[in-house]
Amino acid sequence: MKRYSGMRTFDDREVLVDGRPLDPRFDLKTFSSNGFEWSFEGREPQQLALALIADAADDATAKRLSKAFMQMIVANFDNEWEMTQEEIVAALAALDDQ
């Protein structure tokens, strides 16, 4: 099971999957080329949502649910956060049930 984490430092943001930088998946869709962000709704948080879903589930689900996942999950992250692949998949299932 993969582990995802994000942390804001004084001058940067870092998002990791199992200790490696998470691919922003610009090849799939570019909401923002400014990198990842969280704790609010916007283009950078949606890029993070897309990347998390694509890595934890699949590309089609990432395209379909990135906005809803950003609004439900990513916009509510604290400065430091952690999620497992299982938690992401469960959140996606909840969004599909809506």
Image (cartoon, helix red, strand yellow):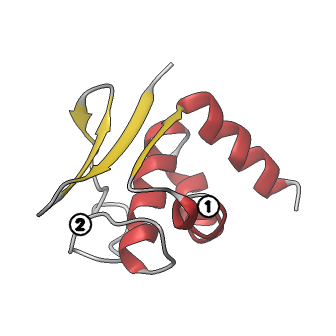
Q: Looking at the rendering, which quadrant does residue 33 occupy?
A: bottom left
In the rendering, at what x and y percent does residue 86 appear? 63, 29
Which residue appears at 22% of the width and 32% of the height? 20
Can you say which quadrant of the picture contains the C terminus?
Answer: bottom right
Residue farthest toward the bottom in the current orientation of the protein: 42
Q: Residues within 10 Å of mark 2 (few under 14, many from 20)?
A: some
Q: Is residue 22 left or right of residue 52?
A: left
In the rendered image of this protein, does residue 45 appear above or below residue 79? below
Q: Looking at the rendering, which quadrant does residue 73 occupy?
A: bottom right
Residue at numbered disc 1: 69
In the rendered image of this protein, does residue 84 appear above or below residue 9? above
Tell me which amino acid carries mark 2. Answer: Gly
In the rendered image of this protein, does residue 72 appear above or below residue 6? below
Which residue appears at 45% of the width and 48% of the height? 52
Q: Is residue 95 left or right of residue 87?
A: right
Q: Looking at the rendering, which quadrant does residue 25 occupy?
A: bottom left
Pick the residue in front: 95 or 25.
95
Q: Residues within 10 Å of mark 1 (few under 14, many from 20)?
A: many
Residue at numbered disc 2: 35
Pick the residue in front: 22 or 63.
22
CA separation in Å, label 1 and label 2 = 17 Å
